[in-house]
């Protein structure tokens, strides 16, 4: 029985721990926070979107340049496998109208409880308030409530998450340790990020309200999801999928009437009576919500009513919100630093998994699915490596 250490008790780390204990190893999960999987629990607060019910090929499209890297891992643990896994933990799931899959309980806590119960029964030891601080030779070093500890592990899985929502544990501080060890890392950047907008006072009544049925465009990417107006700007899945383009500085525009073709819209504009105000007309003729009308006036000061301003309204903003607020981050351990089993080329026996790998995907269950799939893959690869090198 080999000693396996998993550093980070999020979904990727717990998945890896399950694989290693199933292969008969002594597994210790070292988690820096007072409890594991805090980000997973937070994800469940707004409805835990576990995965998206799509074919593998469609599913992979959401990972952009990272798709081919993740392909074998997602092929082995795809959207169907995620649903089976949740059911096996006693969590019924349902698929929403857009294909997003949620546990019936919506929250993460029942799933996490069942998962931790299973890992405990299998013999996984979880140590909380254990922060990995680097190496001393080959030994792993930890700050623990009982002081400094060193562990000689036969294999290690690093699953310390990305670099957002630091208060939940994923503070990205591990990057410095890996960089010093010569691991090739890509700098962190926000993925699935809200936008900062300096709203005028006219927008205040709409704070907290959603803008629905629009088409957001940036860098040639069109997104039909909704966004919520907040005091800080705009947030929500509709914009998150545009983060890669917005990060590159692509201009953002919004189609307020995506289901109306240009000819029909031209006819409607031509039929507008001059005594009707723009707002009245937009409400009555275009059935625009108060939020869409407010956004139109906010962003279109001066230009007249036209097909262009309604279908391609430029949205001026002050950039992405700070990275710590992002739902996820891109950057971290590059593919080139790892072999096909997610083992660090420079550190044989040490594997990486989850959001700390350099891939990104929009919200919609793609994040958790890839974290689970890479955690499982790293755990299996580590077990195979132990079998080969024992
Ligand atoms: C508000 C919010 C909502 C979300 N909703 C969804 C959703 O509905 N669907 C979806 O697919 N995704 C969602 N996500 C994203 C998803 O939660 C993350 O992508 C996922 O949790 C990442 O898993 P991970 O295991 O790689 O890392 P994490 O979950 O971040 O876990 C990493 C763990 O490592 C620990 N750690 C870090 N450094 C050390 C160290 N030095 N020593 C020991 N331990 C350490 C951390 O404390 C943490 O517990 C959401 C995220 C947020 C913030």
Image (cartoon, rainbow, N blue to C red):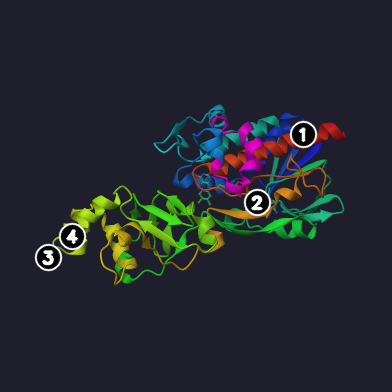
User: Viewed as shown, does residue 389 lie left or right of 305?
Assistant: right
Magenta span: 61-82
Q: Furthest-front residue in view? A: 263
Distance from disc 2 to disc 4, alpha carbons, whole Å, reads 49 Å
Would you say 376 lies left or right of 42 here?
A: right
- What residue sits right under mark 3 in the picture? 275
Tell me, for residue 145, which label it has, or none.
Answer: none
Q: Residue at x 84, y 45 (%)?
A: 152
C-alpha distance separating marks 3 and 4: 10 Å
Which residue is more in the foreground, 172 or 6?
172
Task: Answer with mark 3 or mark 4, whichever residue precedes in sequence.
Answer: 3
Whether residues under marks 3 and 4 lie with C-beta atoms below 8 angstroms apart, the answer is: no
Write down the residue under mark 2: 358
CB atoms of marks 2 and 3 within 8 Å: no
| CA–CA distance in space, label 4 to label 1 | 66 Å
Image quarter (top left, top right, bottom left or bottom right) of the N terminus: top right
Residue at numbered disc 1: 383
Comparing 275 with 198, the one in front is 275
Q: In this rendering, is residue 280 above or below 301?
A: above
- Does residue 191 appear in this view? yes
- 270 relative position to 169: left or right: left
Disc 2: residue Cβ within 8 A of ligand 1's nearest atom: no
Which label is found at residue 280? 4
- Is tag 2's residue or tag 4's residue first in the polypeptide sequence? 4
Residue drawn at point x = 53 percent, y = 31 percent = 83
What residue is shown at x 49% (from left), y 54% (from top)? 242
Q: 79 or 313: which is nearer to us? A: 313
In the image, is residue 339 part of the stretch drawn in magenta?
Answer: no
Can residue 26 be seen?
no
Give the spatial CA distance, label 3 vs label 1.
75 Å
Q: Nearer the viewer, mark 4 or mark 1?
A: 4
Distance (Cα) linking label 2 and label 1: 23 Å
């Amino acid at each position: 029985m080999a000693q396996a250490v998993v550093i980070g008790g999020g979904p990727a780390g717990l998945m890896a721990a399950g694989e290693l204990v199933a292969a008969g190893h002594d597994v210790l999960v070292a988690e820096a926070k007072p409890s594991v999987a805090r980000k997973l629990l937070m994800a469940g607060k707004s409805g835990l979107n576990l995965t998206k019910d799509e074919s593998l090929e469609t599913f992979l499209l959401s990972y952009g340049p990272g798709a081919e890297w993740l392909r074998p891992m997602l092929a082995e643990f795809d959207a169907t496998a995620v649903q089976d896994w949740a059911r096996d933990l006693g969590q019924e799931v349902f698929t929403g109208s857009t294909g997003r899959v949620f546990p019936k309980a919506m929250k993460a806590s029942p799933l996490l409880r069942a998962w931790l119960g299973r890992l405990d029964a299998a013999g996984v030891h979880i140590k909380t308030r254990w922060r990995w601080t680097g190496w001393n030779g080959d030994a792993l070093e930890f700050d623990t409530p009982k002081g400094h500890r060193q562990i000689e592990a036969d294999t290690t899985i690093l699953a310390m998450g990305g670099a957002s929502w630091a208060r939940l544990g994923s503070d990205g501080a591990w990057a410095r340790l890996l960089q010093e060890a010569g691991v090739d890392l890509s700098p962190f950047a926000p993925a699935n990020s809200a936008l900062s907008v300096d709203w005028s006072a006219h927008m205040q009544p709409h704070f907290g309200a959603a803008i629905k049925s629009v088409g957001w465009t940036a860098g040639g990417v069109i997104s039909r999801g909704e966004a919520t107006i907040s005091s800080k700007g705009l947030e929500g899945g509709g914009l998150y999928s545009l983060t890669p383009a917005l990060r590159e500085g692509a201009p953002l525009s919004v189609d307020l009437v995506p289901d109306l073709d240009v000819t029909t819209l031209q006819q409607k504009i031509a039929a507008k009576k001059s005594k009707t105000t723009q707002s009245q007309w937009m409400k009555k003729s275009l059935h625009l919500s108060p939020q869409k009308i407010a956004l139109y006036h906010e962003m279109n000061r001066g230009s007249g009513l036209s097909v262009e301003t309604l279908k391609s309204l430029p949205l001026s903003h002050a950039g992405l919100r700070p990275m710590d607020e992002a739902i996820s981050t891109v950057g971290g351990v590059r593919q080139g630093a790892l072999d096909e089993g997610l083992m660090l080329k420079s550190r044989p026996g040490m594997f990486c998994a989850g959001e700390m790998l350099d891939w990104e995907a929009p919200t919609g269950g793609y994040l958790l699915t890839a974290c689970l799939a890479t955690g499982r893959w790293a755990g299996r690869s580590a077990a195979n490596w132990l079998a080969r090198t024992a």
